[in-house]
Amino acid sequence: MKVSDYIAKYIEKRGVKCVFEITGGMITHLLDSFLQHTDVRIITVHHEQAAAFAADACGRVTGIPGVAMATSGPGATNLLTGIGSCYFDSSPAVFITGQVNRHEQKGDRNIRQLGFQETDIVSMAQHITKKSYLVQQPEDIPAILKEAFEIAVEGRPGPVLIDIPMDVQRADIDVAEPEYTAPATPAVPAALAASVQQLSAAIKGAKRPLLLVGRGVRAAFAIPQLNEFIEKTGLPVVTSLLAVDAIPFAHPQRVGFIGAYGNRWANITLGDCDLLVVVGSRLDIRQTGADVAFFENRTIYHVDCEEAEINNRVKGCVPIVSDVKDFLNAFNTLCAAEQYPRPDAWLQQIATLKAEWPDIKEVVTRGINPNFFMHTLSQHSGATTSYTIDVGAHQMWAAQSLELGEDQLFITSAGMGAMGYALPAAVGTSFAMGDKPVTAIIGDGSMQLNIQELQTIVRNNLPIKIIVMNNQSLGMIRQFQDSYFGSRYQSTWWGYTAPDFAKVALAYGIDARTIEREDEIADAAQWLWNDDNANRPQLLQVMIDPHTNTYPKIAFGKPLTEMEPFSKPIAMEGT
């Protein structure tokens, strides 16, 4: 069998429904094999970074590694930002790059390059992948493919890269048709039981317990187990940025989003708790603030599948090293008969805080209040399966104020924080969802990084609703310049411009509107989802005053509970 045929057939056997790519000489054999021998959809995008972001989102949604392919040289290097996004945000993915023929590779020669577009992508990618392979022998392909897909999903999910020379792709190997059988679920470690019982007792003894949920819960596909845990224990729930969708907006135990730009009431709640149960979150500086001692001033149980993440920045945590799903299953089973006191007084205290600090009152602006817009948009967007959110001020407004339904996903680039993420991620998410509607929320700066993917949306007639929050600046950094650089707006307001995105959308054949006033929001949101438009791509440009700040925001150097604009930072932010 031809190697490229085996690769295509194996990827189909693993349940992959689509691959994202831009063609190039070094992957033509692979593309032809997918076309001739599989039903896998070949999704041609317009930049390899977009292919990587689409694969990232596809892997997050399905749990099956997303697949993106690129040719050698610039094609391969253009994947790197998306590979890093997968690595930092725990998205399973397999990236396949074409490499020049083996006889065209420089090997140990003291030269820069031998073959045209020869580039050592394996060395470049090894620090942002779980494993990277350069295939040297055609006969190694079956074992490498199998191992790559297993590594991508085991433990903390992430990306794997396979670099395959063109002469290897076209070689013939003596191998049977590829098969795949899903492995049996491993038994839960017995040592987990003692930790579960210890935590159970701590919850019973706490006056103000709190659960912090991170991306690890979604990565483990453990939402049903989380729901059972929440119902059983009665714990109020705060979330990290990547776990905004872990609990529905209307759930009575939902508190809000915590961190550097978290809901003020949620940060105060975290500051007041006496027991914090952290499940699948790494407690990075954007969650804890720089004052780690304040964060540590309570009992903390930290559940994570990677031991090195526990007691890393935040010390004194009780470690529970476990897969999140294993932990939740063990707790729900072992504590099925336990009764936990409902913290009614604590829940009432939280409700009072939420009423005292409404998110739509944090920002003072002329024109459209972005937090009010997010509430109204989501109230009219019950038909969307997911929100893909780009990076910038709009990302925080969305996390603070979107009203997510029970099955709606919130997908963004957090660890890498890559602008240009949301549009290609919406493409990947829509395909993963069976071509169902997705809403992409994007700032004007982010929109200009991968705007070419509007053509991918049009060509595939994807029902993606594109919301461009256009403040005609790079607003988050512009706010940073107000705080630390005397309002010298180099490259954010000075020397920066944005087009009329509604006109750009129309040029691509996408229907578009622009709004500038709050009394236009409800009608525009209804326009996105009326019977004529529900299954078509559309773009809504929302004009925001350029000097609208993102509040609340941690006063850097102070505890998590002290937030701008009412508290001022004591040091320049380092992150």
Image (spheres, rainbow, N blue to C red):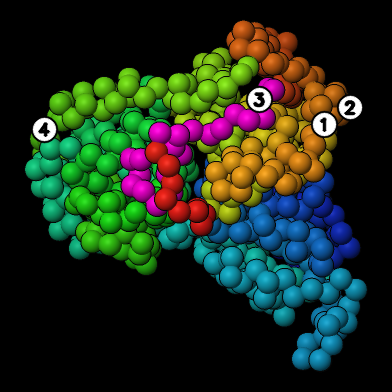
Labelled disc at residue 507: 2
Q: Which corner quadrant of the image does residue 158 belong to?
A: bottom right
Query: What type is the residue that disc 2 sits on?
Result: Ala
Residue drawn at x 72%, y 58% as measured from the top left:
79
Assign the magenta stretch its main secondary structure: loop
> Mark 2 or mark 3, which is nearer the start of the sequence?
2
Left or right placement of residue 48 versus residue 180 in this view: right
Residue bounds of the magenta highlight: 542-566
Residue drawn at x 59%, y 33% as measured from the top left:
394
Q: Which numbered mark, 2 or 1, is in the foreground of this view? A: 1
**How far across and how far down the image is residue 409, in percent?**
51, 34
User: Contact, CB < 8 Å: mark 4 with mark 3?
Assistant: no
Labelled disc at residue 66: none
Q: From the image, tell me which residue sits under label 1.
A: 499
Count residues near mark 3 (Cα–Cα under 10 Å), then give few for <14, some for 14-19, many for 20+.
some
Query: What type is the residue that disc 3 sits on?
Result: Asp
> Mark 4 or mark 1, which is nearer the start of the sequence?
4
**Real-space Cα distance between discs 3 and 1?**
15 Å
**Real-space Cα distance between discs 4 and 2?**
60 Å
Q: Which numbered mark, 4 or 3, is in the foreground of this view? A: 3
Count residues near mark 4 (Cα–Cα under 10 Å), then give few for <14, some for 14-19, many for 20+.
few
Query: What type is the residue that disc 1 sits on?
Result: Pro
Which quarter of the rendering shows the N terminus?
Answer: bottom right
Q: From the image, tell me which residue sits under label 4.
A: 341
Most foreground residue, 65 or 505: 505
